[in-house]
Image: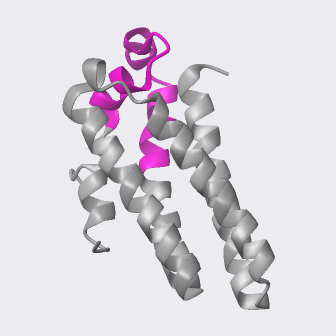
Amino acid sequence: MNPVELIVALYDGMARFLYEAIRAVEARDVPARRIAIGRVLAILMHLQSRLRPDVGGNSAKALSEFYAAIFALCLEGSRLESADRFREAIGCIRDVREAWSVAARDGEVLRQLGGDEGVAARMILTSATGAPASERASSSWTA
């Protein structure tokens, strides 16, 4: 796997764990919900820690805001035991995951990536909707 494919795999993992959290909410299984959300939050923290604002600039900032928005949705969903909040997070994750997936097949992105998520992020943050991922995610929640 190239570095971007690994990022796609992490996004897939977040979605999978969010689906587990939905199942746990529906089954009223609090420990399972907490474990699933803990795994999502661990992935988000890992992705956040790998951002390089010195290299990625505004794109790294936008990804950081996106990760914070998803983090907030997950915490809120867990606190409220809300499958809808988890579904909302999955939708946002899928949008950005698709952009990463396209980038994983783009030779130019891979050349510029050089092992750093921030560089590739500059090239893929705007999806088919034309809105930065952080705007799509953050429009649905408030602090």
Assign the C terminus to one quadrant of the image: bottom left
Residue 2 percent location from the top left of the image: 61, 19
Residue 135 percent location from the top left of the image: 23, 58
Left/right of residue 15 with respect to residue 33 in the rendered view: left
Which residue is depicted at the point 28% across and 26% down?
53
Q: Nearer the viewer, residue 82 or 102?
A: 82
Residue 4 percent location from the top left of the image: 53, 27
Q: Nearer the viewer, residue 94 or 84?
A: 84
User: Up-down: is 88 above or below 121?
Assistant: below
Which residue is depicted at the point 60% across and 30% down?
5
Residue 101 percent location from the top left of the image: 51, 37
Among the 4 quarters of the image, the one containing residue 112 = top left
Left/right of residue 49 with respect to residue 30 in the rendered view: left
Assign the N terminus to one quadrant of the image: top right
User: Number of callouts in the render?
Assistant: 0
- 110 magenta-colored: yes
Residues rendered magenta in the picture: 96-124
